[in-house]
Structure formats: C-alpha cells, structure tokens
C-alpha cells in the first residue's frame, strides 16, 4: 500500500510553507511540499490543519462506493476526480483520479484502535501485502504493509486507546540525514516534537512532530547499519 501524494491543508498556507522550507533547508528531499488552504466547511466543523494522504483511484466514484461498503464515509463534496474519506476508525485520507505530487514522504503509519478492521478496510480499496505483527517496546503490535514483499512503506499501529493523546490518523514521515538536527529546527521554528525518537521496523529511527498549526508529521532516519 502506497500513497500517491500528500498535501498539507493549512490555516495559513504561506506561513506553513515557510515553516517546512526552513525545517528542511539543506535536506535532500524526494519531492516538494504541497500546501493548500484548509477548506472553509472543514474549518467550520472544527477540523485542524493536517496532512492529507491521497490514494490513486482510476475511478473515484467506484472507489467511493467501496469506501462506503467497507464501513467508511466521505467528507465534503465528491467529484469524479477527487474525494476525501474517513476510514471506520476515524483516519482521514483522499482519493484522486489525476496524478498528484508525491511530496517528500517515504513512510506512513496508521494509528488506529483496531488494526484488523483497518486492514480489511484498505484491502477493499487497494492491494495490501500484510506481514505478521511485530511487538515494538513501548508501542505494542505493529503490522507491516509491504510492496513486493520487500520494501517497507506502511505500518498499522493499535495505539489509539493504548497510548495517551493518540487519535486516529495517518502519520507521514520525511527521511532526513540528521534526525536530531532536524528535530532541533522543528522546535526552533515554533513546532513541537512529540516524545523522544524511537526505533521502528527495519531499523528506522523516527520521531513524531507537529507544525505551529498543529498538523502532525514524522521525521525518520534509517540507521547506517541496517
């Protein structure tokens, strides 16, 4: 399972773009940061700024039907080209018929309260190669989703209800050369680092962050020995 693109839906797009530009200054990013205004109806419902991962869908109408049949729902207007959806656990994602900019993210983690339900839901939408769960200290069981059985791209974590303050969401990670230096820049630019870095699957050292508007994102650094 792999997201085709990512966009930051921000309250102040110009300020948000400036934050990420300064945080990632000097990093070898794999793509551009895409930012758009948080839609007015979403703001009226109390939706915060957030990163939206987009799944490619050749037929958005048919994909939306599968979303609803599998227990998800749509948020806002649906067109033949695009839709915003919520999975049964509450995590939000997009569907896009047209190619979209992938951005700099290379790893995604779904925080949910029921991994098996989430796996069944996303299997109804896109090919999913699910590995056996792995227990990570301080995190709990993690289900790897791989492409071609080899490259780790996505994991599912049952952290909602187990770890304090965690809500259902997709967390997208940007690879950086120096994780500690990048985290220092996040804080210097008015963002927040959520907890200490941890080692995830395949030796990936990761940390969760929030930008000044509260949009969550992750940073990752693969250990040289792996």
Image: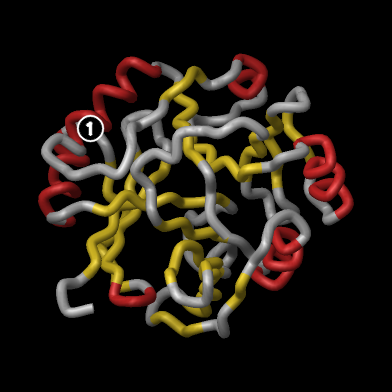
Q: How many marks?
A: 1
For disc 1, the marked residue is 190
Q: Position of residue 112 (x, y in %)?
A: 60, 61
Q: Position of residue 70 (x, y in %)?
A: 83, 56
Q: Position of residue 99 (x, y in %)?
A: 56, 34
Label 1 secondary element:
loop
Q: Which part of the image, by quadrant, shows the C terminus?
A: bottom left
- The residue sitting at 52% across, 79% down in the picture is 141
Task: Please tell me whether residue 138 is drawn above or below residue 194 in the rendered image.
Answer: below
- The residue sitting at 53% across, 38% down in the picture is 52
Q: How is the image coloured?
A: secondary structure
61 to the left or right of 157: right
**Residue 128's image quarter?**
bottom right
**Residue 127's image quarter?**
bottom right
- The residue sitting at 67% across, 34% down in the picture is 97
98 to the left or right of 217: right
Q: Position of residue 111 (x, y in %)?
A: 54, 59
Task: Please tell me whether residue 196 is drawn above or below residue 99 in the rendered image.
Answer: below
Q: Nearer the viewer, residue 220 or 145?
A: 145
Task: Please tell me whether residue 164 is drawn above or below residue 54 in the rendered image.
Answer: below
Q: Nearer the viewer, residue 195 or 119?
A: 119
The 10 Å Cα crowd at callout 1, few under 14, some 14 to 19, many 20 or more, is: few
176 to the left or right of 153: left
146 to the left or right of 200: right
Q: Which part of the image, by quadrant, shows the N terminus?
A: bottom right
């Amino acid at each position: 399972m792999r997201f085709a693109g990512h966009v930051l839906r921000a309250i102040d797009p110009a300020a948000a773009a400036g934050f990420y530009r300064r945080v990632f200054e000097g990093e070898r990013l794999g793509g551009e940061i895409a930012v758009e205004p948080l839609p007015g109806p979403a703001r009226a419902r109390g939706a915060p700024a957030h990163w939206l991962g987009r799944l490619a869908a050749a037929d958005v109408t048919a994909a939306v039907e599968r979303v609803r049949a599998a227990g998800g729902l749509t948020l806002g207007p649906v067109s033949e080209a695009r839709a915003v959806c919520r999975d049964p656990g509450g995590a939000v994602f997009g569907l896009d018929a047209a190619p979209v900019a992938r951005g700099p993210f290379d790893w995604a983690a779904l925080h949910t309260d029921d991994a098996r339900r989430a796996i069944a839901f996303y299997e109804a939408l896109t090919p999913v190669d699910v590995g056996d769960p792995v227990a990570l200290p301080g995190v709990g069981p993690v289900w790897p989703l791989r492409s071609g059985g080899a490259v780790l791209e996505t994991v599912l974590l049952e952290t909602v209800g187990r770890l304090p303050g965690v809500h259902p969401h997709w967390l997208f990670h940007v690879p950086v050369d120096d994780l500690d230096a990048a985290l220092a820049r996040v804080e210097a630019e008015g963002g927040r680092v959520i907890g200490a870095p941890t080692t995830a699957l395949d030796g990936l050292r990761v940390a969760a962050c929030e930008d000044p508007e509260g949009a969550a994102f992750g940073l990752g650094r693969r250990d040289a020995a792996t």
